[in-house]
Image (tube, rainbow, N blue to C red):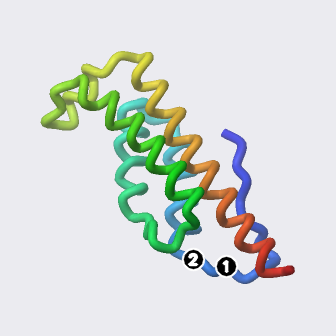
């Protein structure tokens, strides 16, 4: 996955988000099972303080989380093992949503650091 991290030459106004994104990048780059990567990444998204994001980024996250929830509604998931029942096509779609969200959050951080320099 190609990462676009916020510039380290500028003070970071969102250190918590930066930490969460680094953790998500590490999860996405791991060699774990697709279901584990998805579950662990989704756990990290719940830690994001959405109040600090701009409207565009929040809306983008909402659309992708909605797409993931739409997929999950099709499966009776009660335990972690139930994620194994999700089709490979749906797992790939969920993973792409997570990658898009991560990329958008990196873009948000980059834009914020660039705006601060202006």
Q: What residue sits right under mark 2 in the picture? A: 15
Q: Residue at x 20, y 28 (%)?
A: 82
Q: Residue at x 41, y 31 (%)?
A: 33
Give x and y (percent) for residue 6.
72, 65
Give x and y (percent) for residue 98.
50, 42
Residue closest to the eye, 116 or 106: 116
Q: Give the label on residue 92, or none.
A: none
Question: How dense is the environment of label 1, judged by Cα within 10 Å: few (below 14), some, or many (20 and up)?
Answer: some
Q: Secondary structure at mark 2?
A: helix
Q: What residue sits right under mark 1 in the picture? A: 12
Question: How dense is the environment of label 2, judged by Cα within 10 Å: few (below 14), some, or many (20 and up)?
Answer: few
Query: What is the C-alpha distance between the residues marked 2 and 1?
Result: 6 Å
Q: Is residue 30 left or right of residue 87?
A: right
Q: Residue at x 50, y 63 (%)?
A: 20
Q: Quadrant of the C terminus?
A: bottom right
Q: Quadrant of the N terminus?
A: top right
Q: Secondary structure at mark 1?
A: loop
Give x and y (percent) for residue 43.
35, 53
Q: Is residue 103 left or right of residue 27?
A: right
Evaluate whether residue 112 shows in this view: yes
Do labels 2 and 1 touch, CB within 8 Å? yes
Q: Is residue 19 left or right of residue 8?
A: left
The quarter of the picture where residue 51 lies is bottom left
Compared with 101, 97 (above or below) is above
């Amino acid at each position: 996955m190609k990462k676009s991290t916020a510039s380290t030459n500028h003070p970071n106004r969102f250190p918590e988000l930066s930490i969460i994104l680094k953790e998500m990048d590490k999860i996405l780059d791991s060699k774990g099972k697709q279901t584990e990567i998805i579950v662990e990444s989704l756990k990290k998204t719940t830690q994001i303080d959405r109040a600090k994001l701009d409207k565009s980024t929040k809306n983008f996250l909402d659309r992708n989380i909605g797409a993931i929830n739409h997929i999950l509604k099709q499966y009776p998931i009660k335990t972690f093992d139930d994620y194994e029942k999700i089709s490979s096509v749906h797992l790939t779609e969920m993973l792409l949503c997570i990658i898009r969200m991560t990329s958008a959050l990196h873009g948000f951080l980059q834009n914020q650091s660039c705006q601060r320099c202006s």
